[in-house]
Image (spheres, rainbow, N blue to C red):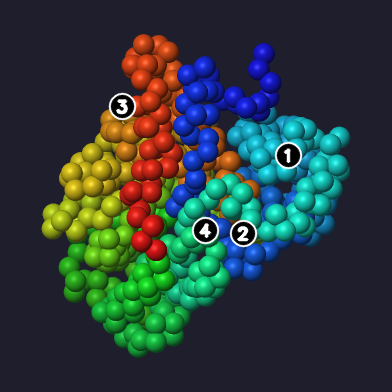
């Protein structure tokens, strides 16, 4: 019987162990999509305690605690940090076979050197030991990032953000590149007219541009897109249920915009057309600048009205959706490709039933100009675990080129989430190693090791060209 979380954790055979330890384990990390708060990096804070760094904002843990019967007061409520941690420690033993069990103990090992299993019996000592370490200079957020060999972090930022924290980090000469990502979803959210009108008003102020029509709005947003580029941005991102690709005319969208500003209710088709037009404009700007555009597709958000009202968005009330993805995605990518205006693109899928759809769709628009120009991105959110990652990697292997995948990302708000890269790398090594030992691939460790290194690091390094910053 293997020991839990030993050096060969997840590695299924000797070949996997060799691939991981000799080729993958020491590679740097390029985390090209996350939700880390740049203000905390700029201030180089030390977290108050383990609850602060571990449980604040982590809806994965919150969902598990609710499922375990923990009252909301101990999750997003007013109980003390120590009381909240105690409830998490009570929950952990019940997370067996949930990825949280692995992530929790990986993070305790990798950051704090703690090999004990977290439970009510060990909680007090683990909490005290971690809290003491968190107060030391080695555990400031900048040093946490450096300790895991992180080279690049790309945060997720609204177009109206002034990026002052990114500017400060750069001025400080911090060795880790912390770059913004342009996330304009609020700028096109015609489902909520009040919120969209408030956003347009705010855009007018931030862009210092009077907005009386659609052209003015696009010019103001383009000004922000340019501003992001001036501050090192090289990626955009969208979190959408699905791609919007309705046919429309410019005059139709101009009329819809005026209707939005007059606060008149839109028809469903008008909402879809407005979103389609805005997505297309954003994509053209991304191509013009040579950015990489990312589309996170398939989340059904804010399912629980009572929970949403009590705790707000992004607090654990979302799920996998069953949206129809293929036709609109094909139309959208094809419209951009027709005039050779399709930027490098990464598609992330939340419904595993669509894995093969996404893997095959990318192949329609790889034109030979860039290796892996259109990517089927790594398993995301609910699929960011052993089974989900393996299914995504297999779907890509079967239909596309796994060897050109740009690797893993944390998609996390936590500074302790970087062992997810390790988890991914171990699984990649397993896939190749099993095929080698089964005689399905040649026993060429040197070449296979190079492919593993490319997937884990070098493909991303070449694809994004962050060295230019």
Foreground of the two, 95 or 152:
152
Residue at (48% x, 34% y) in the render: 24
Q: Residue 199 is drawn in which quadrant? A: bottom left
Is there CB contact under 8 Å for labels 4 and 3?
Answer: no
Of badges 4 and 3, the one in the foreground is 4
Q: Position of residue 339 (x, y in %)?
A: 13, 58
Q: Which element type, helix, strand or loop, lies under badge 1? A: loop
Name the N-terminal-most of marks 4 and 2.
2
Q: Which element type, helix, strand or loop, lies under badge 4? A: loop
Would you place residue 136 above or below residue 86 in this image? below
Is there CB contact under 8 Å for labels 4 and 1?
Answer: no
Residue at (47% x, 58% y) in the render: 154
Label 4 crowd (10 A; few <14 / some 14-19 / many >=20): some
Name the N-terminal-most of marks 2 and 3.
2
Would you place residue 270 above or below residue 244 in this image? below
Label 1 crowd (10 A; few <14 / some 14-19 / many >=20): few
Q: CA distance from mark 3 to mark 1?
A: 39 Å
Q: CA distance from mark 4 to mark 2?
A: 8 Å
**In this picture, residue 187 sits left or right of residue 114:** left
Q: Which element type, helix, strand or loop, lies under badge 3? A: helix
Q: Which residue is mark 1?
A: 113
Q: Which residue is mark 2?
A: 142
Name the N-terminal-most of marks 3 and 1.
1
Q: Which residue is mark 4?
A: 176
Q: CA distance from mark 4 to mark 1?
A: 24 Å
Q: Which residue is mark 3?
A: 398
Of badges 2 and 3, the one in the foreground is 2
Of badges 3 and 1, the one in the foreground is 1
Name the N-terminal-most of marks 4 and 1.
1
Label 3 crowd (10 A; few <14 / some 14-19 / many >=20): few
Name the N-terminal-most of marks 1 and 2.
1
Q: Position of residue 4 (x, y in %)?
A: 68, 24
């Amino acid at each position: 019987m293997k020991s839990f979380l030993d050096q060969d954790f997840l590695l299924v055979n000797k070949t996997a162990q060799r691939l991981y330890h000799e080729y993958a384990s020491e590679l740097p990390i390029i985390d090209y999509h996350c939700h880390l708060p740049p203000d905390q990096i700029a201030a180089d804070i030390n977290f108050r305690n383990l609850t602060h760094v571990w449980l604040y904002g982590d809806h994965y843990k919150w969902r598990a605690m609710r499922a375990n019967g923990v009252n909301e007061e101990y999750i997003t409520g007013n109980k003390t940090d120590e009381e909240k941690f105690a409830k998490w420690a009570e929950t952990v033993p019940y997370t067996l076979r949930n990825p949280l069990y692995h992530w929790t103990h990986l993070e305790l090992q990798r950051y704090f050197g703690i090999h004990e299993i977290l439970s009510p019996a060990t909680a007090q000592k683990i909490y005290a030991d971690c809290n003491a370490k968190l107060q030391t200079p080695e555990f400031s957020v900048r040093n946490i990032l450096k300790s895991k060999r992180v080279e690049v972090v790309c945060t997720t930022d609204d177009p109206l953000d002034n990026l002052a924290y990114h500017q400060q980090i750069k001025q400080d000469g911090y060795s880790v590149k912390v770059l913004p990502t342009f996330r304009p979803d609020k700028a096109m959210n015609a489902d909520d007219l009040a919120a969209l009108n408030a956003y347009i008003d705010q855009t007018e102020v931030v862009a210092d541009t009077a907005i009386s029509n659609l052209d003015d709005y696009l010019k103001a947003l383009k000004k922000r897109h340019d501003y992001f580029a001036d501050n090192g941005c090289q990626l955009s991102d969208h979190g959408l249920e699905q791609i919007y690709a309705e046919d429309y005319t410019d005059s139709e969208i101009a009329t819809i915009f005026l209707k939005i500003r007059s606060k008149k209710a839109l028809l469903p088709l008008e909402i879809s057309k407005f979103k389609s037009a805005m997505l297309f404009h954003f994509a053209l700007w991304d191509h013009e600048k040579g950015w990489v555009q990312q589309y996170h597709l398939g989340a059904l958000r804010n399912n629980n009205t009572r929970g949403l009202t009590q705790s707000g968005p992004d607090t654990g009330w979302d799920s996998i959706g069953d949206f129809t993805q293929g036709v609109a995605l094909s139309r959208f990518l094809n419209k951009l490709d027709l005039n050779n205006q399709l930027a490098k693109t990464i598609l992330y899928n939340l419904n595993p039933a669509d894995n093969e759809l996404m893997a095959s769709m990318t192949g329609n628009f790889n034109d030979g100009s860039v290796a892996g120009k259109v990517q089927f991105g790594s398993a995301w959110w609910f699929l960011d675990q052993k089974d989900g990652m393996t299914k995504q990697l297999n779907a890509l292997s079967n239909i596309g080129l796994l060897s050109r995948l740009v690797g893993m990302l944390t998609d996390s708000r936590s500074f302790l989430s970087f062992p997810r890269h390790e988890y991914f790398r171990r699984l990649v090594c397993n896939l190749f190693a099993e095929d080698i030992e089964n005689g399905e691939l040649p026993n060429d460790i040197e070449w296979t090791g190079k492919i593993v290194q490319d997937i884990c690091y070098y493909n991303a390094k070449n694809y994004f060209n962050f060295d230019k910053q």
